[in-house]
Each structure stands twice: as structure tokens, then as C-alpha cells.
């Protein structure tokens, strides 16, 4: 474990907001060949509607091709949990997650799919990526079915 990591292996409080949350990273030694794709799935992501204060729920799928840094997963969990009491629209939450990972790791490529469960009968799906996927990589479908109970 790196001495620079402040959250892994320690008891830490949940961040009060996404802006206060710290995304920690660890060094990555990239193998030869095409970039590796790393996937994080958060099927129970929650935030608050900024107008009503009601909870919103999403299934996030994050794919990225790391360059020199990896996202440390405990810090990612704490960052994602920090949205629970944060009011933002679906689009803003989804893009903010992707942008923070890009800021922290400077990956070769990243995409995020935010598959939001319906409120008022309408599911909202939000997609953001940094550009075209790297050539030669295996990039599976995000595996989230079109809405029909999503599960």
C-alpha cells in the first residue's frame, strides 16, 4: 500500500459532497500492446433531485483505459457515495463523475453511461466520453438493457 493513500486500509468518514471527496490514484505499469480497459459498475448510485429533493437512482458503468494512474476503488466508492445528499440533475451527476476520474488519472480514454431509473415514468440515460476508443482494445457493450425494470 502506498503511503500517499489516505483512505485505503483506514476508517474514514463519508465525504459531505462530491466537491469534498478525494479520488485517490495508484501508479499503473501499462503492459505492451493495446490499452487495457478497466470497468467499474455502480448499480446503486444515488443522488437527489435539485428541485424536489427526492432521491434519484442510477446504474453507472465506467470504462477507462488507464495511462499512468489507476483509480483506487475505495476512494471511488466514497466519491460516488458523496452524491447521496447532493442535488444535481442526472446529466450533471453523470458527467461530473466522468470528469473527476479524468482529472485524477489522465486516462488514455474514458466513457461513462448513467442509466437512470424512471421518475414520472421516464428513464433518462446519459453518456459521456473523452473521444474515440483506443484502437485495438476489446470494448464490451455496457450490458445494461433498455428500460424494462432494468434488472
Image (cartoon, grey):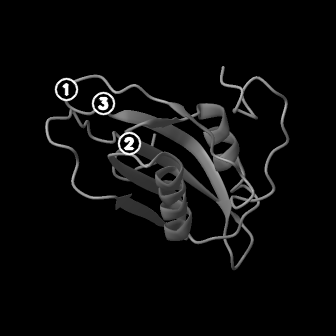
Please name whichever residue, 72 or 150, is drawn nearer the observer in this view of the structure.
72
Identify the element where label 2 is drawn.
strand
Residue at point 66% right, 24% down? 2
Check disc 1: other Cα within 10 Å, few if <14, some if 14-19, many if 20+. few
Q: Select label 1 or label 2 by which is in front.
A: 1
Q: At numbered mark 1, what does the secondary structure look like: helix, strand or loop? A: loop
Q: Crowding at label 3, few (<14), some or many (≥20) Cα neighbours within 10 Å?
A: some
Q: Position of residue 144 (x, y in %)?
A: 37, 43
Q: Which residue is mark 2?
A: 63
Q: Are marks 1 and 2 in contact (CB under 8 Å)?
A: no
Residue 134 image offset from top left, x and y in percent: 21, 44
Q: Which residue is mark 3?
A: 36
In the foreground, 139 or 137: 137
Q: Tell whether label 1 touches label 3 (CB within 8 Å).
A: no
Q: Nearer the viewer, residue 126 or 62?
A: 62
Q: What residue occupies the far top of the structure in this picture? A: 1
Q: Which label was assigned to residue 79?
A: none
Figure quadrant of the N terminus: top right
Label 3 vs label 1: CA separation? 9 Å
Q: CA distance from mark 1 to mark 2?
A: 18 Å
Q: Residue at x 38, y 42 (%)?
A: 63
Q: Nearer the viewer, mark 2 or mark 3?
A: 3
Left or right of 82 in this view: 42:
left
Q: Is residue 81 above or below residue 117?
A: above
The answer to the question of whether label 2 and label 3 lie on touching residues, with beta carbons closer than 8 A, is no
Q: Is residue 10 above or below residue 52?
A: above
Front-most of residues 2 and 42: 2
On the image, the x and y values in percent for residue 75 come to: 66, 39
Residue located 44% across and 44% down the image? 61
Which residue carries the number 1 mark?
Answer: 33
Amino acid at each position: 500500500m502506498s503511503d500517499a493513500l489516505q483512505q485505503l486500509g483506514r476508517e474514514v468518514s463519508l465525504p459531505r459532497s462530491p466537491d469534498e471527496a478525494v479520488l485517490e490514484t495508484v501508479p499503473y505499469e501499462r503492459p505492451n500492446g493495446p490499452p487495457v480497459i478497466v470497468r467499474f459498475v455502480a448499480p446503486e448510485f444515488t443522488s437527489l433531485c435539485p428541485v424536489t429533493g427526492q432521491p434519484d437512482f442510477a446504474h453507472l458503468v465506467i470504462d477507462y483505459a488507464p495511462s499512468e494512474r489507476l483509480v483506487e476503488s475505495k476512494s471511488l466508492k466514497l466519491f460516488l457515495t458523496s452524491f447521496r445528499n447532493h442535488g444535481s440533475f442526472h446529466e450533471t451527476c453523470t458527467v461530473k463523475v466522468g470528469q473527476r476520474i479524468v482529472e485524477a488519472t489522465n486516462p488514455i480514454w474514458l466513457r461513462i453511461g448513467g442509466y437512470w431509473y424512471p421518475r414520472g415514468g421516464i428513464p433518462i440515460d446519459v453518456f459521456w466520453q473523452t473521444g474515440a476508443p483506443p484502437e485495438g482494445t476489446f470494448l464490451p457493450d455496457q450490458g445494461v438493457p433498455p428500460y424494462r425494470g432494468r434488472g
